[in-house]
Image (spheres, grey):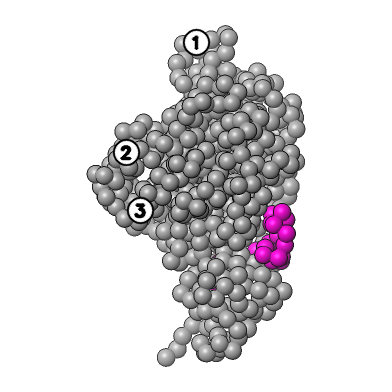
């Protein structure tokens, strides 16, 4: 009998996440899968092997699983970066954060000068006016960039656009009498240039370079996203709300199938402008097109918007600063209908809820759907679910739901949540990782890249330390241990994707997916977890150094 060659990787330490053998020094790989871990003498029993010493001084962990990201981050790097914080691009270059609205406008003006034809549109991303005081950004701000080109900027949350007058004109919105909850009007009766929620954003998106169908087809963007994954030790990444038109699916299957593509992409079909019947039918068809490195067939649903954009739905007493309640993105009948049909057909649904009223709505809808359509092990997951309280986590546990919480918020918006959006008490318990675990809710944590930078170890640091940008600690009672945090970015996230039988730990039979680290996350101080240096990854047995060869 002949079999494929065996490689045994030697490492300084291998943290397996397999309780039967939590640590090892060697891991044997054949056909992209793990034969086992242990001392060399034991693994030699599998037959002739090549010993690979590349990682002799490195620490291996299961490849990180990013349970909520968007491959569009790779595409966004085509546009002007306007975020508040410094940020590394896929090539490793760090772009400085914008310090004021004036700074944002200046950067757009600089980018505008590089453009050719006088009607070409200009796009930016990462804006968040909440950092710059009470004032909203209005179209007059971006009219200073151009009055002949459409200028559009995506907020960091991905839930709001700000555009200039020309963009409104092209979209047919520069007129009195516009009556839409996502399109605020100024004192002159005309739209201010802010567009909230998918409906309003879709009307203008195509005019400013943010056509979602077109974005789905960006091959270079997908490759750039993969580079970011390697830099952060990620070997399986979600692409959590794609419209997945046919040509995009073909492109993704081709690119992810290339011998040198380093990541498994799990792409969810966005539930938008579809009936539940259509959505489930599409999901079932997509599932049949799955490959090892492109997993399809699940659905992403949006219930509300973003907290810092004041478009999330909050229960009483609402926003701390008195802002009006946010937007419903999907009516309850559609949520209930989708849940019931998806349960019946075995289709996985992940639901975005930020505010606690949205979470309550999703719980009510699932409870009703489960009465009509009892289902075991559905793993429906609430994504973000940032404001859920203890009672809601207990309900989630009873209904068999998972939570994928968003601890990056503590750093990026924790101060704003404390001071402005939800106030001190709720800011202290947001993203309640400890309560989720204590309630028995399967837990993952995420970056929502491009909303915040991809980086599971940074996210784990957020869950362990709950530190804000200004240095506040938001609620130590919800902090979790380093060991628990490392589990959530591997097995925890894999569970929510129904991939825990394939990835998430280093053990016999699973994919040979490793995060290759220069520092040991169990030895480094917990407050330095985000500073663990990353060499790159091994995916399906193939090494991918972050900095080229
Ligand atoms: Zn998202």
Relative height, residue 467 to residue 307 (above, below): below
Nearest to viewer (mark 2 / mark 1):
2
Closer to us: 118 or 432: 432
Residue 75, position as x, y percentages in the image:
58, 45
Question: Is the distance from the Cβ of mark 1 to the nearest ligand 1 atom less than 8 Å?
Answer: no
Closer to us: 470 or 122: 470
Q: Secondary structure at mark 3?
A: loop
Write down the residue under mark 1: 176
Does residue 260 appear to the left or right of 278 in the view shown?
Answer: right
The residue range painted magenta reads 518-542
Write down the residue under mark 3: 378
Query: What residue is rendered at 47% in x and 38% in y?
Result: 353
Closer to us: 432 or 377: 432
Q: Tell me the crowding category of disc 2: few under 14, some 14 to 19, or many 20 or more residues within 10 angstroms, Cα based.
A: many
Relative height, residue 131 to residue 40 (above, below): above
Relative height, residue 331 to residue 527 (above, below): above
Q: Residue furthest top?
A: 188
Does the image show residue 275?
Answer: yes
Residue 246, position as x, y percentages in the image:
39, 48
Check the picture and name the quadrant holding the N terminus: bottom left
Question: Is the distance from the Cβ of mark 3 to the nearest ligand 1 atom less than 8 Å?
Answer: no
Query: What residue is rendered at 49% in x and 10% in y?
Result: 176
Whole-number angstrom distance, CA of label 2 to CA of label 1: 36 Å
Nearest to viewer (mark 1 / mark 3):
3
Write down the residue under mark 2: 336
Whole-number angstrom distance, CA of label 3 to CA of label 2: 15 Å
Choose top left, top right, bottom left or bottom right for residue 371. top left
Query: What residue is rendered at 42% in x and 62% in y?
Result: 291
Magenta-span inclusion, residue 152? no
Closer to us: 42 or 526: 526
Relative height, residue 67 to residue 304 (above, below): below
């Amino acid at each position: 009998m002949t079999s494929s060659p065996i490689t045994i990787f030697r490492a300084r330490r291998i943290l397996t996440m397999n309780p039967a053998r939590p640590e090892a020094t060697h891991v044997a790989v054949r056909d992209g899968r793990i034969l086992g871990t242990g001392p060399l003498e034991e693994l030699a029993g599998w037959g002739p092997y090549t010993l690979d010493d590349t990682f002799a001084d490195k620490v291996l962990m299961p490849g990180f699983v990013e349970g909520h990201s968007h491959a569009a981050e790779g595409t966004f790097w085509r546009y002007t970066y306007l975020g508040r914080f410094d940020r590394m691009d896929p090539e490793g270059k760090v772009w400085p954060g914008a310090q004021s609205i004036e700074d944002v406008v200046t950067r757009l003006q600089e980018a505008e000068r590089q453009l050719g034809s006088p009607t070409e549109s200009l796009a930016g991303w990462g804006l968040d006016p909440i950092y710059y005081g009470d004032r909203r950004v209005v179209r007059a701000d971006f009219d200073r960039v151009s009055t002949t080109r459409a200028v559009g900027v995506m907020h960091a949350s991905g839930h709001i656009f700000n555009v200039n007058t020309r963009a409104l004109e092209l979209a047919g919105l520069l007129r009195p009498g516009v009556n839409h909850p996502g399109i605020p009007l100024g004192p002159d009766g005309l739209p201010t240039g802010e567009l909230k929620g998918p409906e309003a954003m879709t009307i203008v998106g195509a005019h400013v370079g943010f056509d979602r169908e077109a974005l789905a087809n960006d091959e270079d963007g997908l490759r750039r996203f993969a580079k970011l994954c390697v830099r952060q030790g990620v070997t399986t990444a979600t692409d959590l709300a794609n419209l997945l038109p046919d040509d995009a699916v073909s492109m993704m299957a081709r690119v992810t199938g290339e011998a040198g593509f380093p990541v498994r992409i799990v792409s969810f079909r966005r539930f938008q402008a579809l009936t539940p019947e259509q959505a489930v039918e599409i999901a079932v068809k997509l599932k049949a097109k799955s490959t090892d490195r492109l997993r399809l067939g699940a659905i992403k649903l949006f219930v509300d918007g973003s907290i810092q954009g004041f478009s999330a739905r909050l229960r009483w007493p609402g926003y701390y600063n008195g802002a009006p309640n946010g937007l419903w993105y999907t009516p309850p009948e559609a949520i209930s209908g989708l849940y019931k049909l998806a349960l019946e057909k075995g289709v996985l649904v992940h639901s975005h809820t930020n505010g606690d009223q949205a979470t309550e709505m999703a719980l009510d809808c699932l409870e009703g759907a489960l009465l009509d359509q009892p289902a075991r092990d559905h793993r429906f997951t609430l994504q973000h679910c940032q404001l859920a309280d203890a009672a809601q986590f207990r309900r989630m546990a009873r209904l068999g739901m998972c939570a994928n919480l968003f601890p990056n918020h503590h750093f990026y918006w924790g101060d704003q949540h404390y001071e402005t959006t939800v106030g001190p008490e709720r800011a202290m318990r947001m993203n309640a990782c400890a309560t989720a675990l204590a309630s028995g809710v399967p837990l993952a944590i995420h970056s929502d890249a491009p909303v915040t930078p991809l980086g599971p170890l940074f996210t784990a640091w957020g869950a362990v330390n709950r530190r804000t940008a200004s240095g506040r600690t938001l609620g130590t009672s919800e902090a979790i241990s380093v060991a628990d945090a490392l589990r959530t970015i591997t097995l925890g996230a894999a569970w929510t994707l129904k991939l825990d039988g394939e990835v998430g730990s280093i053990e016999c039979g699973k994919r040979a997916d490793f995060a290759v680290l220069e520092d040991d996350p169990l030895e480094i101080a917990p407050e330095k977890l985000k500073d663990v240096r990353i060499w790159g990854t091994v995916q399906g047995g193939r090494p991918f150094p972050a900095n080229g060869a």
